[in-house]
């Protein structure tokens, strides 16, 4: 079974704080993804990575950065959190030869 | 126009009923199609892939119509446990990322 874990289920931060969201997978998958999910908008891709130290912008990268120093770990960074970044953040992972993505439990981030 | 469009619902149906959802996609280069299920406050999980010939998994049947660019999901003999949001998902050829519809919320009533 694929296991994808995220560092926190709930997080409350203040405007301007730097926020780190971490995702760890145990299946040796090459591909990792960060999404945010908002009511009425569905899941939107922020960044993804095909390999260590590699990253690609998704559809809404503004205000975010990512880091992938090890294959199993993909971090999402909010350099200066803003209230419009209050959302559910979901990490996902996929193998090289499959489209199926496996999701972590999500982090509900509130920025005050 | 959104790349993947679904009726957000909510759909409220009685237990035992048959319910069907449709989803349309805009990019004719889309190659892979899926239905994911998301329970309240949980992560999305793959329900089934959708193949050109149509496929069935127990009470669930998925169909793909490439000419009209839509995907359907049929649930027969619905159970209370089928209550969830169903996400239509496509993968465009050459792009290793999925595009998600906003989801259709289904509630099965006793």
Image (cartoon, coloured by chain):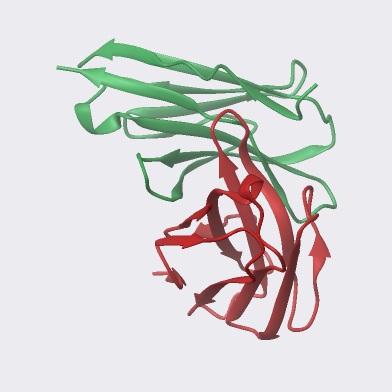
* Chain appearing in red on the rendered image: A
Q: Report whether A89 appears left or right of B99.
A: left
Residue at left 42%, top 24%? B105
* Residue A68 figure quarter: bottom right
Residue at left 80%, top 25%? B26
Q: In x, y percent, where is residue B42? A: 38, 48
Up/down of B30 relative to B8, above or below: below
Up/down of A102 relative to A7, above or below: above
Could you tell me if residue A98 is visible in this image?
no
Q: In x, y percent, where is residue B72? A: 55, 22
Up/down of B23 relative to A11, above or below: above
* Chain appearing in green on the rendered image: B
Work out whether residue A98 or residue A71 is closer to the camera in this orientation and state it.
A71
Up/down of B16 relative to A7, above or below: above
Work out whether residue A78 or residue B107 is closer to the camera in this orientation and state it.
A78
Residue at left 63%, top 53%? A35
């Amino acid at each position: 079974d694929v296991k994808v874990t995220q560092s926190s289920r709930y997080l409350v931060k203040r405007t301007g704080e730097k926020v780190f969201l971490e995702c760890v997978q145990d299946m040796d998958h090459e591909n990792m993804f960060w999404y945010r999910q908002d009511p009425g908008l569905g899941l939107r891709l922020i960044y993804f990575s095909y390999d260590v130290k590699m990253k690609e912008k998704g559809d809404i990268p503004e205000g975010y950065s990512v880091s992938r120093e090890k294959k199993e770990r993909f971090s999402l960074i909010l350099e200066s959190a803003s209230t419009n970044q209050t959302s559910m953040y979901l990490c996902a992972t996929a193998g090289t030869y499959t489209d199926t993505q496996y999701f972590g439990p999500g982090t509900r981030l509130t920025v005050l | 126009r959104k790349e993947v469009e679904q009726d957000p619902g909510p759909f409220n149906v009685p237990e035992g009923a048959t319910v069907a959802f449709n989803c349309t996609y805009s990019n004719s280069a889309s190659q892979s199609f899926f239905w994911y299920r998301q329970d309240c406050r949980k992560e999305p999980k793959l329900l089934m892939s959708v193949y050109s010939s149509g496929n069935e998994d127990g009470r669930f049947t998925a169909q793909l119509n490439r000419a009209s660019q839509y995907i359907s999901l049929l649930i027969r003999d619905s159970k209370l446990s089928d209550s969830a949001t169903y996400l239509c998902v496509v993968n465009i050829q050459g792009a290793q990322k999925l595009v998600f519809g906003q989801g259709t919320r289904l509630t099965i009533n006793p």
